[in-house]
């Protein structure tokens, strides 16, 4: 049995235990298509990287040029991910709309006392059991601090988000597990 899984693999384990068996025990992994063009996974990775780069550079002080900087960083990350010029003609305006929304959302949160804390934080938590220790690992997109000093965990999604019903039923435990790891001293 695996003695360590990431938070995202726990979601797979809950929904399809055989997939974890195939990956972790049998070592079976799907192969990418030959000459695969960038798709949703590469887009998401590039845009996560753009946000991480900008937020880390800005810290607590978002500049007046935040939207323009985000868009340029996004463009650079998309190019590095292999997006062609004709694909950028669609992707960059799409990201500009997201950057405008994000900037407005950030301004509203800052007005309420939220402050950026850290981006792309890796952590782990060891769970003790009679069958042996199990380590849960994870990487969070962003932590903000609330006005009263609480931690606000943010996970960016370029696709669809988990529903409250799926989270409450235990089918999508990413954020609850991240919160549990965040509570452990020194994890994040």
Image (cartoon, helix red, strand yellow):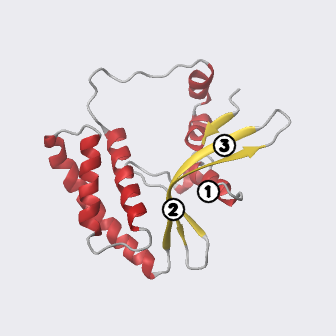
Q: Which of 8/73 is in front?
A: 73
Tell me the residue at 27%/63% (across/down).
69
Q: Nearer the viewer, mark 2 or mark 3?
A: 2
Q: Which of 137/100 is in front?
A: 137
What residue does disc 2 label? 118
Q: Work out whether mark 2 precedes mark 3 in sequence or the reverse, and give the earlier one.
A: 2
Which element type, helix, strand or loop, lies under badge 1?
loop
In the rendered image, the vertical position of residue 114 relative to residue 167, given as above or below: below
Q: Residues within 10 Å of mark 3 (few under 14, many from 20)?
A: many
Tell me the residue at 34%/51% (across/down).
47
**Spatial distance from mark 3 to mark 1, Cα to Cα?**
13 Å
Q: Work out whether mark 2 precedes mark 1 in sequence or the reverse, and give the earlier one.
A: 2
> Residue 163's x, y, as percent?
50, 53
User: Quarter of the image containing the C terminus?
Assistant: bottom right
Q: Which mark is residue 44?
A: none
> Residue 1's x, y, as percent?
71, 26
Q: Are marks 2 and 1 in contact (CB under 8 Å)?
A: yes
Which element type, helix, strand or loop, lies under badge 3?
strand
What residue does disc 1 label? 188
In the rendered image, the vertical position of residue 81 relative to residue 103, given as above or below: above
**Spatial distance from mark 2 to mark 3, Cα to Cα?**
20 Å
Q: Which of 95/172 is in front?
A: 95
Direction front: furthest residue: 57
Q: Residues within 10 Å of mark 2 (few under 14, many from 20)?
A: some
Q: Which mark is residue 136?
A: 3
Tell me the residue at 31%/66% (across/down).
101
**Spatial distance from mark 2 to mark 1, Cα to Cα?**
9 Å
Tell me the residue at 41%/21% (across/down).
31
């Amino acid at each position: 049995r695996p003695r360590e899984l990431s938070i995202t693999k726990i979601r797979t384990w809950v929904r399809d235990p055989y997939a974890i068996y195939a990956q972790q025990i049998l070592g079976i992994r799907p192969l990418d298509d030959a000459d695969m063009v960038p798709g949703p996974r590469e887009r998401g990775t590039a845009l996560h990287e753009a946000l991480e780069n900008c937020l880390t550079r800005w810290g607590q002080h978002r500049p007046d040029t935040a939207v323009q900087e985000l868009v340029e960083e996004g463009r650079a990350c998309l190019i590095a991910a292999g997006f062609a010029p004709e694909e950028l003609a669609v992707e960059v305006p799409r990201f500009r709309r997201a950057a405008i929304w994000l900037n407005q959302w950030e301004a509203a949160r800052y007005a309420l006392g939220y402050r950026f804390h850290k981006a792309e934080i890796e952590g782990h938590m060891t769970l003790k059991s009679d069958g042996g220790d199990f380590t849960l690992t994870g990487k969070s997109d962003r932590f903000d601090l609330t006005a009263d000093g609480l931690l606000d965990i943010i996970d960016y999604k370029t696709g669809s988000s988990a529903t409250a019903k799926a989270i409450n039923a235990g089918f999508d435990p990413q954020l609850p597990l991240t919160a549990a790891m965040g509570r452990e001293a020194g994890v994040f």
